[in-house]
């Protein structure tokens, strides 16, 4: 099974940049999109459909902001929009999918760069998601969390860690939440497989950062530890353009 996550930084914008052609090449079984910035009803049938997939949409109440979508080849997968907490769900930040004994969370974690209030909001989002994951682990479920975490975990995960140490996305109080998830039965699948590999999934549009290799790894797969034997690979598709993020894929053994 192949799961691909991609922050598209505007679904309508990426449609004009070869999006569907890229998806046809990647050919995931499940496609998780973040920051779609559109409501389903604003799109034409042709725009909202990806051939061979069934789409699920969770848009923000605020127009042109946030939002996630998920496309699956298997129509029998059950989906739930949101965490069940109004303050987060109005921003359309998560879709939960049940795939056999695996629960998949596709999430667009909040950005904390608009001030301390938003940093606190972001940390509360992490806390609520971890609380729900703890319950799933206690119930014997395996969990995958993917999406744009809006945080780089360690210095290896961004090009200029010292210069960004006081910037949201690399604040100590944000980074420690990834530690908390790892302490609660999760593994950062990419870093587990590639402990020394330097590769990024996001680049600012400024200063020609992508061409210069000045990026951040913001898009993750946190996988339950007992599911890791099924993980064959995590691939950062940094050759695929269309957004300030690139797609990232998780390959699981067929069961």
Image (cartoon, rainbow, N blue to C red):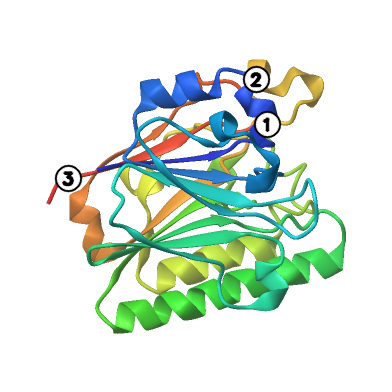
Disc 3 marks which residue? Answer: 253
Q: Which mark is residue 12?
A: 1
Disc 2 marks which residue? Answer: 16
* Picture residue at 70% right of the left edge, 42% below the top: 42
Viewport quadrant of the N terminus: top left
- For the residues marked 1 and 3, what is the alpha-carbon distance in whole angstroms? 33 Å
Find residue 254 and report its horizontal and vertical position in percent.
15, 46
- For the residues marked 1 and 2, what is the alpha-carbon distance in whole angstroms? 7 Å
Q: Relative to 170, is 209 above or below? A: above
Q: Nearer the viewer, mark 1 or mark 3?
A: 1
**Observer-nearest residue: 56 or 167?**
56
For numbered disc 3, what is the local secondary structure?
Answer: loop
- For the residues marked 3 and 2, what is the alpha-carbon distance in whole angstroms? 33 Å
Find residue 192 and report its horizontal and vertical position in percent.
34, 49
In the picture, measured across the screen, residue 165 lies left or right of residue 57, that is right
Q: Are marks 3 and 2 in contact (CB under 8 Å)?
A: no
Task: Quadrant for residue 62, please give it.
Answer: bottom right
Q: Are marks 1 and 2 in contact (CB under 8 Å)?
A: yes
């Amino acid at each position: 099974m192949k799961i691909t996550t991609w922050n598209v930084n505007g679904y309508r914008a990426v449609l004009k940049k070869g999006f569907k052609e890229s998806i046809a090449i990647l050919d995931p079984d499940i496609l998780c999109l973040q920051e779609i910035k559109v409501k389903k009803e604003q799109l034409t049938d042709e725009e909202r459909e990806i051939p061979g997939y069934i789409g699920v949409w969770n848009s923000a109440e605020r127009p042109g902001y946030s939002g996630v979508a998920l496309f699956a080849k298997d129509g029998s997968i059950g989906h739930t929009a949101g965490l069940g907490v109004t303050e987060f769900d109005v921003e359309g930040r998560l879709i939960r999918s049940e795939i056999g004994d695996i629960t998949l969370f596709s999430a667009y974690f909040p950005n904390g760069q608009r001030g301390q209030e938003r940093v606190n909001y972001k940390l509360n989002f992490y806390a609520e998601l971890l609380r729900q994951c703890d319950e799933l682990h206690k119930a014997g479920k395996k969990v995958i969390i993917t999406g744009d975490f809006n945080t780089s975990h360690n210095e290896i995960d961004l090009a200029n860690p010292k210069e960004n140490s006081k910037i949201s996305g690399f604040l100590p109080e944000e980074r420690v939440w990834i530690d908390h998830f790892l302490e609660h039965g999760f593994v950062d699948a990419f870093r587990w497989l590639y402990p020394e590999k330097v590769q990024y999934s996001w680049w600012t549009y400024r200063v020609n950062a992508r061409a210069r290799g000045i990026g951040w790894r913001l898009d993750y797969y946190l996988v339950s530890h007992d599911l890791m034997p099924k993980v064959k690979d995590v691939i950062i598709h940094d050759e695929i353009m269309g957004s300030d993020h690139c797609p990232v894929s998780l390959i699981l053994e067929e069961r």
